Amino acid sequence: MNPFKYSRAHDTGAAISQAATTNGAKFIAGGTNIIDLMKLYIENPPALIDINQLNLNKIEVLSNGNVMIGTLVKNSDLAYHPVISQKYPVLSEAILAGASAQLRNAASTGGNLMQRTRCPYFYDTQFPCNKRVPGSGCSAIPGYNRDNAVLGTSDKCIATHPSDMCVAMAALGAIIHVQGPKGTRTIPFADFHLLPGQTPHLEHNLHPGELITSVELPALPFAAKSHYLKARDRASYQFALASAAVALDIQNGTIKAARIALGGVGTKPWRSMAAEQALVGKPAGHKAYQAAAQAALTGAKAYKDNGFKIELAKRTLVQALTKVGGMA
């Protein structure tokens, strides 16, 4: 690990000011991803700014019914919070499907948003990787790519986004609040993570020095009937091959509204508006769910080893929809 400067911020303004004075400085909370990357010389920040002392660890229900989640809320605390488990079970289930209990106890909400891909070629510095070293090439495209993406890929990168939590937040239409040297702003969840395109090293929509302060979940009453389903090689501590976050509003047997996002198959948390539109106005049932799955994977591109993910994602989505449909 390269030498770096460590400091501890005691308020948000101080944290942002410290970040603004050191080019390339990073914020650290749980550190469950960035420390590993620093040990491997993939991340080499000149300074780490510890934000654990900031007052950003609350979960609050706002007067309009939205829920505000502080960026420092631990993943385990968020998953088990009664408001989340009752009003947004899809989010609770997604978090508990990820990582291990020890990691969930340390990892923060903001950090989960920022976690980087687990593509093996990104982690192995002996191989070229456009995400790690822009312009060096993508080893996954001609290499072993069973775990890589089939949606949102480019000729420069096919790495998947690894987060389970983010898939549920994409489905719920979360809003990300940030604060930086130029003030505060909000970012719709769909716009926060970037597609790789020709610049896969650019992964998010944060400006230099900006700090995620909270994530807002819109009041979505039908999200109380929601589910996260994750298909993976083993039952725990494994990233998704395919996953689906689903919420349905079914009235008198007809689907009035739907929220659908996929994980494990996209280069970013993959909300499928096409799948949602395929469901609205249709009778709840297998025929509609299959049509939604087909719509969700339209445009998917298979590579040498991961073509199975397309069918797996369809079946995962149909199964998740069937479960939520049965809750009506």
Image (spheres, rainbow, N blue to C red):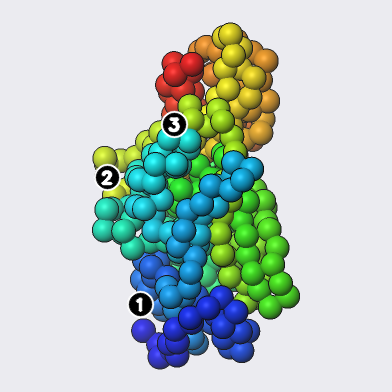
Q: Secondary structure at mark 2?
A: loop
Pointer 1: what residue? Answer: 39
Q: Residue furthest right?
A: 182
Q: Earlier in the sequence, mark 2 or mark 3?
A: 3
> Dots 2 and 1: beta carbons under 8 Å?
no
Q: Report, in whole angstroms, how far the alpha carbon at label 2 lies from the one at label 1.
A: 25 Å
User: Residue shown at 35%/45% (left/top)?
Assistant: 80
Q: Position of residue 142 (x, y in %)?
A: 50, 54
* Foreground residue among 203 and 12: 12
Q: Amino acid at mark 3?
A: His
Q: Nearer the viewer, mark 2 or mark 1?
A: 2
179 lies left or right of 68: right
Q: Amino acid at mark 2?
A: Ser
Q: Secondary structure at mark 3?
A: strand
Q: Nearer the viewer, mark 1 or mark 3?
A: 3
Res 14 → quadrant: bottom right
140 lies left or right of 271: left
270 lies left or right of 90: right
Pointer 3: what residue? Answer: 227
Pointer 2: what residue? Answer: 236
* Residue 191 in view in this figure: yes
> Dots 2 and 3: beta carbons under 8 Å?
no
Q: Earlier in the sequence, mark 2 or mark 1?
A: 1
- How would you rate the neighbour count of disc 1 (Cα within 10 Å): few for under 14, some for 14-19, many for 20 or more? few
